[in-house]
Image (cartoon, grey):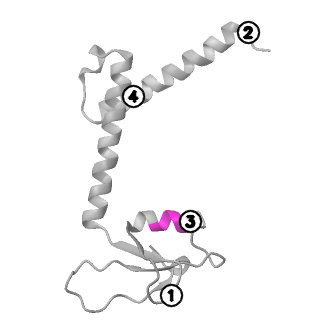
Amino acid sequence: APGPAEGAGRSNTFHFNKLLEATHTLLDAGVVEIYSFSYEALLERSEKLKEEEQRAARQQQLATGKQWEFCWSREPGAEMYGPYTSEEMHAWKEHKFFSAERVAYARPKEQDMFAMDEAELQEAHTIDF
């Protein structure tokens, strides 16, 4: 059984790795005054920066990327889900959320609110998102 010294060593390694990750994140973002931050402040600033970057990336995808909607049935009036980015749809397809065994139907989400025709539904697992 590991003794107290071994447990403390693992804990120190964990905290050191978190510190390294936080400093790399901040330095990559141009925050150079990291040496004046406490451990807790480094972790907090790093997490906030990551959240902001994720939020900005999501907004960029929604603003510029192709969007999709899907449903589980081709029946008229079937509930449509979306819009989702191509990246989201691709990830779900890769994780077998859409497959030949679990058939969903997808189409590009129409960006033009005045468009008369909607795109035809296709089996989602056959689309290259």
Marks 4, 1: nearer the viewer:
1
Which secondary structure lies at badge 1? loop
**What residue does disc 4 label?**
22
Marks 4 and 1 sit apart, C-alpha to C-alpha, by: 48 Å
Is residue 61 one of those drawn in magenta? no
Residue 13 in the image: state x and y as whole percent. Answer: 56, 19
**What residue does disc 2 label?**
3
Marks 4 and 3 sit apart, C-alpha to C-alpha, by: 30 Å
Residue found at x 54% / y 80% = 126
**What residue does disc 3 label?**
94
Relative placement, left or right, of 62 versus 11 is left
Is residue 90 one of those drawn in magenta? yes
- The residue type indicated by label 3 comes to Glu
- The residue type indicated by label 1 comes to Arg
Tag shown at residue 74: 1
Residue 69 in the image: state x and y as whole percent. Answer: 40, 75
| Mark 4 crowd level (few <14, some 14–19, many ≥20, 10 Å Cα) | many
